[in-house]
Amino acid sequence: MKKRISTFWMLIVSGIFLVGMVAFSLLYIRFSNSRKNIASNEKYSSYYAMICDDNESSFVRAVYESAADKGREDGIFVELMGENLSRKYSKEDYMEIAIASGVNGIIVEADDSPKMTELINEAMSKDIPVVTLFSDSPASNRCSFVGISFYNLGCEYGEQINKLIDEKDFTYDKIKVTVLVSSSEADNAQNLVYTALKETVDKNAPYRKTSKPVEIRVVSVDTTNSFSVEESLRNLFITARDEVSDIIVCLEEQETESCYQAVVDYNKVGEVTILGYFDSQTILKAIERNVIHSTMSVNTKQMGYACVDAISEYKKLGYTSQYVATDLTLINQVNVNRYIED
């Protein structure tokens, strides 16, 4: 009986492994054929693969479109891997496929996991330059990291909080600030934002117009999908009235849009102040309606161009800038109409 059970489970495991290998092989063949077709087109001399967590994010789409535009200018085809697929694969799967396909360069939304570090190092050892985007893999041999200054971002949020503390009349004995962080992201970048934010707020304490203490806390949000974000945020708005945050800082586009919706759904407009991230149409309209106080906009065109330039420069010269910081812009009631028109 034990032998039968053991054989049964071995067959199941073997079947799952076989299905996985077949799926991976089909995906590899698809991207290999895609690369060959592109290579045969005289318009393109190189093929760069872009790998991100969420291809549907308007932030990712904006950066990709800029990278693709820059690629077309330089005779390079940039493909966002994972588009038009019924099944979602991991970033590590796409990295393996890109390496096996022999692409000319990789742009990846990295992390500091050992597996990602190993794959980046493997690509670099095979003369495939890797640029990390949004989040870094500092222990790897990647040729460049293109992102924002997380410390400057935290300082900017801190400055906005300081202005709000002086301008608004807060109801309770202490001013509650909540910083939403993604549970799926590497801690180093988010910790840097939080540290800079707290330092900026604390330094301003002797100069405040109010004597009320400021309490800053971090709340982890599950950003796996929009439903998990909404579920995480729900708890912030159904607690006792005196526990509701006065100011909520969002570090991602999805969090900002979900927080905006939650404030409307739970009748907290005017009571909760949202400091957002990115400039999607939803976020800009919310600022126009005075539901979101302000947002930090990232120069996505600059970011996409920098990714392509970094790979091309490394291929040509053997070196490039280790770190490229892109611009941040504060959008609020003063300038939001210009951004909506654009």
Image: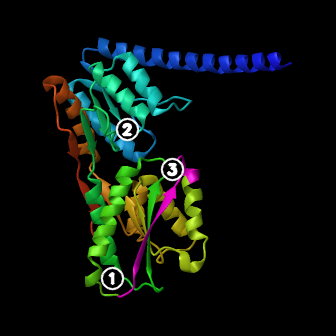
Residue occupying the point 45% across, 60% down: 180
Q: Which callout, 3 or 1, points to the residue nearer the camera?
A: 3
Q: Of residues 16 and 26, which is closer to you in this image? A: 16
The residues tagged by marks 3 and 1 sit, at their Cα atoms, a distance apart of: 32 Å
Residue designated by label 1: 167
- Res 41 label: none
Other-residue count near label 2 (Cα within 10 Å), few / some / many at <14 / 14–19 / ≥20: many
In this rendering, the answer to whether 31 lies above or below 266 is above
Looking at the rendered image, the quarter that the C terminus falls into is bottom left
What is the three-letter code of the residue carrying label 3?
Answer: Thr
Residue designated by label 2: 110
Looking at the rendered image, the quarter that the N terminus falls into is top right
Q: Which callout, 1 or 2, points to the residue nearer the camera?
A: 2
Answer whether labels 3 and 1 touch (C-beta < 8 Å): no
Q: Is residue 325 left or right of residue 277?
A: left
Q: Percent x, y for residue 63?
A: 32, 41
The residues tagged by marks 1 and 2 sit, at their Cα atoms, a distance apart of: 40 Å
Where disc 3 sits, the SS reads loop
Residue designated by label 3: 223
Q: Of residues 39 and 318, which is closer to you in this image? A: 318
Q: Which callout, 2 or 3, points to the residue nearer the camera?
A: 2
- Tell whether position 227 is magenta: yes
Other-residue count near label 1 (Cα within 10 Å), few / some / many at <14 / 14–19 / ≥20: few
Residue span colored magenta:
211-228
In the image, farthest residue toward the right: 1
